[in-house]
Image (cartoon, rainbow, N blue to C red):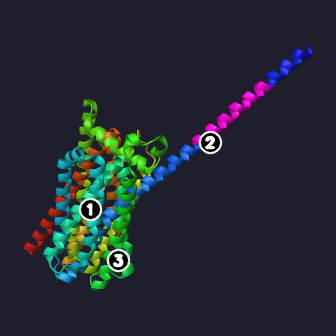
Amino acid sequence: MTTSDAKQDTQADLDAAELDGLLGSTTDRFRQETRADDVEAGRARIMVRFALFSVGVGANSVTSCYLASVGFYEERLHSKEVFGFQMLVFQGVMLFTIMLQHLYDDHFEQRHGVRTAFGFRIICPGIAQLALAFLMPYCSSPSQVLILGALGSFLSTSQWSTAAQLGSVLLPGGSVMVGAGSMAGSASTVFTAPLVGFGPSSDMRTAIVFYGIGALLTAVGTGIFCFYHMMATDAAETDDSQRQSISGRLSISYQAIEESQELAASSDSQGHTRVSSTMVTVLLFCNTFTSFFATPFFTLATPHQSQALMLRKLGGDAIGRFTALTHSSKYGRTSTVEPWVRSLCVGLSIFKVLPMLYIVHWLQEAGMGVVASDDSRLNLVALFMFSIGSYADGMLNVDAQLLVPDGQRKSVTRANVLSAASGALVAVLAGMSVRHGEDYVR
């Protein structure tokens, strides 16, 4: 081998080594960028979940204080009947609000734009609830209690149902995240009521502090969403780096909702939606019915026991929804809920009839002065029943959303909420009819 050949071989080896080094550094840089993108996307998902959770907390904190005041209003107004009418008005207005949304939301979104319509329906009700929070402790007549309850139901329902529709488009199980926040807002009363000493015999100052904490949670939750909503821009103006941010994801979701309204769904997907929606509608109706049927009987017990039962309901709702949130976090946009989960939800909805009958029987005997004062078993049964009901409700919603494309999840979520609200209203009406029918017979 000549000296020139050796030099050429050496240069070739150097060139190959340099090329390997360049490829290696390029591969390492690509991996680092991919990891960075994954980290950024993970942070964005966390922030999206946090924003949805926050608006859920804000939407339900004030009205949960209102419902947890069953013993307070019973003592203040000297009436055991007012709570039944509170529940009736609250659930009736909720159903009316959802029907209005079902009829007119798409019209206003097309006229004013999805971003404007969603911002108005989420932010403005949260602000209005702050005023209600400071009026509710001063109610001195049943009519005032019912009027403020109707306004609170209208504002709260508009806020959380709109947020749930948006969450279902933002990420899989997003509506469950809103529901978990809503249940957390409800559960906050379980801790704040004993913390400030709020109960049936509380004075006005304690009641104002109790409702003030609910108003604070509403202000914080609504404010967090308002901040990100104001940062959202037109999706066409959102570059690749912004798409991973929460404001960018909001922009893209608003655009997806607009596109879903402009494009007609295919006949296959429409048929699939009808079949799945019919099944879920029946299950949600039955599940919610068994959760609310016993509530008109709460005031058959003492004011302290009725308030404790309502707090158990709010706490059980939160436990069940957080369990559903944990379970649904593993699903992606193209995932489907396993058949065994759907069967479990059906089984739980049927099984709930047993604890519901136990609670009603216990309260009926309490109204006749038959049972002892120990209600620890009753509270445990109530906590268990409301927990499994809330879990089934959350998983059924996720199941229905994952069966349809992203653009249809908003309408499916709205239909599910309508079904659940219908079940709650019919349950309260049925419970009041049974209770007052027995009173009439006696």
Question: In the rendered structure, which disc, 3 or 1, sits on the residue that comes first in sequence?
Answer: 1
CA separation in Å, label 2 and label 1? 44 Å
Helix, strand or loop under label 1: helix
Helix, strand or loop under label 2: helix
Which residue is at a point 26% across and 39% down the rendered structure image? Answer: 261
Q: Nearer the viewer, mark 3 or mark 2?
A: 2
Q: Nearer the viewer, mark 3 or mark 1?
A: 1
Q: Nearer the viewer, residue 175 or 263?
A: 263
Q: Nearer the viewer, residue 140 or 430?
A: 140
Residue type at the position of mark 1: Pro
CA separation in Å, label 3 and label 1? 24 Å
Residue type at the position of mark 2: Gln
Q: Quadrant of residue 77?
A: bottom left
Residue type at the position of mark 3: Ala
Q: Which residue is mark 3?
A: 193
Q: Which residue is mark 1?
A: 125
Judge from the rendering whether residue 345 lies leftward or rightward of residue 271; answer left or right: right
User: Which residues lie in the magenta part?
Assistant: 14-34
